[in-house]
DNA sequence: GGATGTGAAGTCGTTCACAGCT
DNA sequence: AGCTGTGAACGACTTCACATCC
């Protein structure tokens, strides 16, 4: 959040920012900003503020955003295709280096056509082999929910430590693996509840 | 989360569940489950547990999941199209009742072809008019980030109180509006940081 | 002077442990 | 006997307030 705000300030040509301003931009408390940043070191200058460029670089270093993260998409349906075409990845250090689907034939044409160049769709059984070759860091599960655990097991076997799960299934992984779940209807449930409870 | 677990238990033919089992299914503490549920009322029976069907219905009532929520997609690019085609909405009480885009011509054909029937794409300026007609509860922003605030202002003018924002822009709304942000690269940043900090 | 870094206070959420029902 | 509901202990995060330093 701070990294994103800082980039915006940088683009605007600003050089220094105070915790108060950064807080207001991010919609949080100023003390919060200082605590968060101070946790990782002393980045600010008393009486002045934070040098935007330096702080931005420091944060990116801390978050690991200054290196490339190589990703695989598993499941090339609507969502998977959408992610393959997702332009924001290009600006950031995220790169999709492989796409997997059980249906090899069906999707290739459509996706390739949209993306402008042929996309190679591989069978999920080849995950382990390809993960090593292409140094995959993160796997994105965009299959039907019923396949989620099955696919997860293949990801674990391939020793890919980061997983982004777009299915509603609660997947099980050994410790040491990082899983983030993103499920649209759960987010909508949240909005719906807040709307309903405010209305009354 | 509980609602989803309960549905699964229901499908499996179970009738009663204890806080301990529900907790284990959801990956949380048993006391947590009891506190969460007790907050809204006394749903359990001491010495027995919770009747799954009743609890499931109660939770859905509390969350507002037993009524239809009518949504509009604004921005019919890759992501917007993907959401229009998203099948999980059909099983839940979420319904996309309108789609908006500044480019009326470009997308109609492609989406319609995929969806099997013609999809009507409207200009965002018609949001207010259509919101009233079609009783839109929630607006989904799937435009480029640069358009987010612009579109948000139209949503506010149309008096749509729930907003799901898929752009990285931090949008501003008057109080009384509910906004949820879903931004893929932020989630990936999180995964990347956790991976990096574990590795060292 | 002015903004950071940080102990202390305050707030919120989680977990424990057990009284109270069924 | 067993499991819920809940006060109390605990822990984590947020905010305050000010000493500290540029």
Image (cartoon, coloured by chain):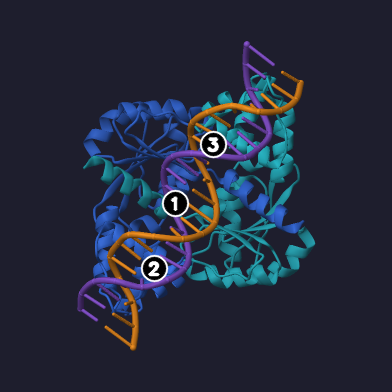
Chain colours: A cyan, B blue, C purple, D orange
The foreground one among A79 and B187 is B187
Q: Secondary structure at mark 3?
A: loop
Subunit under mark 1:
B
Please tell me which residue is depicted at 23% across the width and 34% down the height of the picture. B132
Subunit under mark 2:
B
The foreground one among A157 and B88 is A157
The foreground one among A188 and B195 is B195
Q: Secondary structure at mark 2?
A: helix
Q: Horizontal placement of A68 versus A145: left or right?
A: right
| Lower sequence index among marks 2 and 3 | 2
Q: State how far apart marks 2 and 3 are (Cα).
A: 31 Å
| Lower sequence index among marks 2 and 1 | 2
Identify the residue under disc 3: B168
Please tell me which residue is depicted at 49% across the width and 65% down the height of the picture. A144
- Residue A172: % across, % down: 56, 70
In the rendered picture of this protein, how many numbered marks are placed on residues?
3
Q: Horizontal placement of B4 versus A141: left or right?
A: left
Q: Taking B31 as reference, is B140 above or below it?
A: above
- Residue A51: % across, % down: 71, 25
- Residue A15: % across, % down: 70, 20
Tell me if residue A93 can be seen.
Answer: no
Q: State how far apart marks 3 and 1 are (Cα).
A: 27 Å
Residue A48: name its quadrant: top right
- Pointer 2 and pointer 1 on the same chain: yes
Please tell me which residue is depicted at 39% across the width and 68% down the height of the picture. B5
Toward the right, the furthest residue is A133
Tell me if residue A114 can be seen.
Answer: yes
Q: Which mark is residue B5?
A: 2
Identify the residue under disc 1: B114
Q: State how far apart marks 2 and 1 are (Cα).
A: 32 Å
Q: Which mark is residue B129?
A: none
């Amino acid at each position: 959040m701070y990294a994103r705000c800082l980039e915006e300030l940088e683009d605007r040509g600003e050089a220094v920012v105070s915790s108060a301003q950064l807080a207001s931009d991010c919609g949080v408390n100023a003390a919060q900003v200082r605590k968060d940043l101070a946790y990782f070191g002393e980045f600010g200058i008393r009486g002045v503020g934070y040098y935007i460029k330096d702080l931005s670089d420091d944060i990116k270093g801390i978050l690991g955003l200054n290196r490339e993260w190589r990703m695989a998409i598993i499941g090339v349906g609507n969502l998977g295709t959408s992610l393959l075409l997702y332009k924001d990845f290009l600006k950031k250090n995220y790169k999709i280096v492989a796409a997997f689907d059980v249906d090899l034939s069906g999707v290739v044409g459509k996706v390739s056509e949209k993306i402008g160049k042929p996309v190679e769709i591989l069978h999920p059984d080849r995950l382990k082999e390809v993960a090593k070759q292409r140094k995959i860091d993160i796997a994105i599960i965009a299959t039907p929910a019923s396949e989620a655990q099955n696919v997860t097991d293949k990801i674990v076997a391939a020793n890919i430590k980061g997983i982004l799960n777009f299915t509603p299934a609660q997947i099980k992984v050994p410790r040491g693996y990082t899983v983030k779940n993103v499920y649209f209807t759960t987010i909508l449930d949240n909005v719906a509840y807040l709307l309903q409870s405010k209305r009354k």
